[in-house]
Image: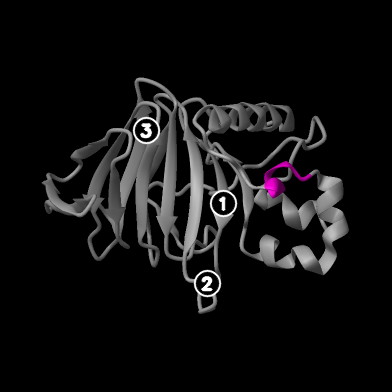
Amino acid sequence: MQRSEVNSYLKEAMVFFKAHGFSLPPFACWSPEHWATLGAAGDYMRQRGLGWDVTDLGSGKFEQIGLVLFTLRNGLIGDPSKMFAEKIMMVRKDQRTPFHFHFQKTEDIINRGGGHLVIELYNSDPQEKFASTDVVVRCDGRERTVSPGGSVILEPGESITLVPGLYHSFFATHSHTMVGEVSSVNDDTKDNRFYEPLPRFTHIDENQRPLFLLCSDYKTYLP
């Protein structure tokens, strides 16, 4: 992706979240120059990957495969001082996040408003392939059973709990959708298993200066 594209998607996401009544924290608008002044004071935030993420998962087709998200809070695996995480996401209409599962993370995915969110599901087998067994999940506490590869559709306000080892893929229908995630600690460097191997973070062609830093930018841009 080009940095100019990333900047454009960030601007769009900020307008989208505001239109849906979701207020981002002040650090969502910090410039790269401001981040650079924080020094050790910002280490806590950087180490936990707080902030923006724009990814096409290496597809080169962001409109079809990708995601814009903002990590509001997060801990570190093994650190008992904070054992939870929260994200807010903008899922574009018909934009897919490919099948993946997490080795450790349990998460609630919540449709916070917009269109419908379709979540397709498979159990994983011991070889980390798709299992041929029915999938049992809880949606707002209610147990639901779907066939392998079947889907659950979340209308605004509804949620689903996804446990470790459960393959899931999701996309929005009808319109762009605001999606929340509340989970145990999130570690995007080690805890994701994509069914088809994909890079979690996107290579960016620096054709423009960053509007805001992505969480994957911190090591490059900050001392």
10 Å neighbourhood of mark 3: few (<14), some, or many (≥20)? many
User: Which residue does the image show at 66% across and 28% down from the upper left?
Assistant: 11
Q: Is residue 211 left or right of residue 62?
A: right
- Which residue in the protein does label 3 denote? 171
Residue at which label 2 appears: 82
Residue at horizontal 38%, vertical 65%?
103
Task: Determine the residue located farthest toward the top in the rendered image.
Answer: 174
**Identity, as a three-letter code, of the amino acid under mark 2:** Lys
Question: Which comes before the other along the chain, label 3 or label 2?
Answer: 2
Q: Position of residue 96 (x, y in %)?
A: 41, 33
Name the residue located 20 percent from the left edge and 54 percent from the top edge. 141
- Please, what secondary structure does the residue beneath circle 2 have? loop
**Which dot marks residue 115?**
none
In this figure, which residue is indicated by the disc labeled 1?
71
**Residue 94 x %, y %:** 39, 25
| Element class at badge 3 | strand
Q: Give the Cα distance between marks 2 and 1.
A: 14 Å
Number of numbered discs: 3
Q: Which contiguous range is marked in magenta? A: 26-30
